[in-house]
Amino acid sequence: MSDNVSPLPSEPYFPDAFTRYIEQGQALAKNAGLPWNIKLDDKGIALKGCGWDLRQLLKDGNPLQAKLRTFSTFSKASTEMIARDLLQPGAREEPRPVSSAWQDFIKAYALNHLLVAGLSMPHLASMCNALRLIATVTNDKSPRHLNSDDISFCMSVAAAIQPSGQTVIVIRSLVKTVIDAYHLSDACPLYPLISHGQPVSSRNSRASMFNKRESSLQETLSSRKSAEK
C-alpha cells in the first residue's frame, strides 16, 4: 500500500463583491499597462512619475493634464470632524494617505469610470473627491462595511463644508450608481435608506437634520479616539 496521501482538493474561491470590483480594476490596469501599486508620500500624493496619466490612457487628444495622484484624506472634512470633537486636534487635520482598501477603491473606480462606463474626466474628479471624503469621515472604515448611517453622516459633513450641496449630490450618485449597483457593501442597498433632505444655509440647521444618526456615530468614533490615546 502506498504511503502517499492524496492532497485534499482546494476550496473554491468565491470573492465578495468588493473584492471582485477591485480585481476587475486590477485587470483593467494590467491590460492598460498601468502599475497597480502607486507609491505615495506621507500626505497621500503620488511620488513624481508614479501617478497614472489618464490623458495618455484615454488618448483623447485633450492637451489639459489629468493624472490620478491624490489618495489623501479630505482636509476640510478633517477640520469639520475636529470641530465636532470626533478627531484629536492636530493629529489628523493634516492630509495623510487613506487606507489601502480606499486607495484600491479609488483606482478601481477610476478605471471603470473611464474605460468601462466612458464617463467624463471632471465627473471622475468629483467622484474621487467624494470617495476620499467618505474614507476620511468614516476613519477608513472598510468600504464593504459601510452602512446608511455612515453615508448620512458623510452627507452631513459634506453639507457643512460645501453649503451649495454639490458634494452631497455626488455622494448620493456614488452610492446609487457604484456602491449599490455593484453591491460593494454588505448592507446594500444603501440609497433608499440615506437622508434625502436638501442642505440648508445654516450650519446648525444642517447638523440638526442629521442629529439622530450622528449621535450614534459620535459615540462610535469617540470610542475609537479614546482607544487610540
Image (cartoon, rainbow, N blue to C red):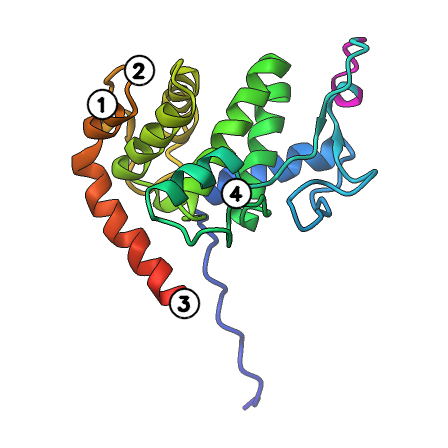
Crowdedness near tag 1: few (<14), some (14–19) or many (≥20) residues, C-alpha within 10 Å: few
Disc 4 from disc 1: Cα separation: 31 Å
Q: Is residue 28 above or below residue 101?
A: above
Badge 2 element: loop
Type of amino acid under label 3: Lys
Please tell me which residue is depicted at 75% across the width and 41% down the height of the picture: 35
For residue 201, which numbered disc appears in the image?
Answer: 2
Disc 1 from disc 3: Cα separation: 32 Å
For residue 4, which numbered disc appears in the image?
Answer: none
Where does label 4 land, which residue? 102
With 217 as the anchor, is 29 left or right in this view?
right
Disc 3 from disc 2: Cα separation: 35 Å
Type of amino acid under label 1: Ser
For residue 229, which numbered disc appears in the image?
Answer: 3
With 32 as the anchor, is 126 left or right in this view?
left
Please give the range of residues in magenta: 56-61
Quadrant in the picture for residue 79: top left
In the rendered structure, are the residues bearing label 1 and label 3 in contact, judged by CB atoms less than 8 Å apart? Answer: no
Where does label 1 land, which residue? 205
Crowdedness near tag 3: few (<14), some (14–19) or many (≥20) residues, C-alpha within 10 Å: few
Please tell me which residue is depicted at 41% across the width and 65% down the height of the picture: 228
Query: Which one is earlier in the sequence, the residue at label 4 or at label 3?
Result: 4
Q: Position of residue 126 (x, y in %)?
A: 53, 21
Type of amino acid under label 2: Ser
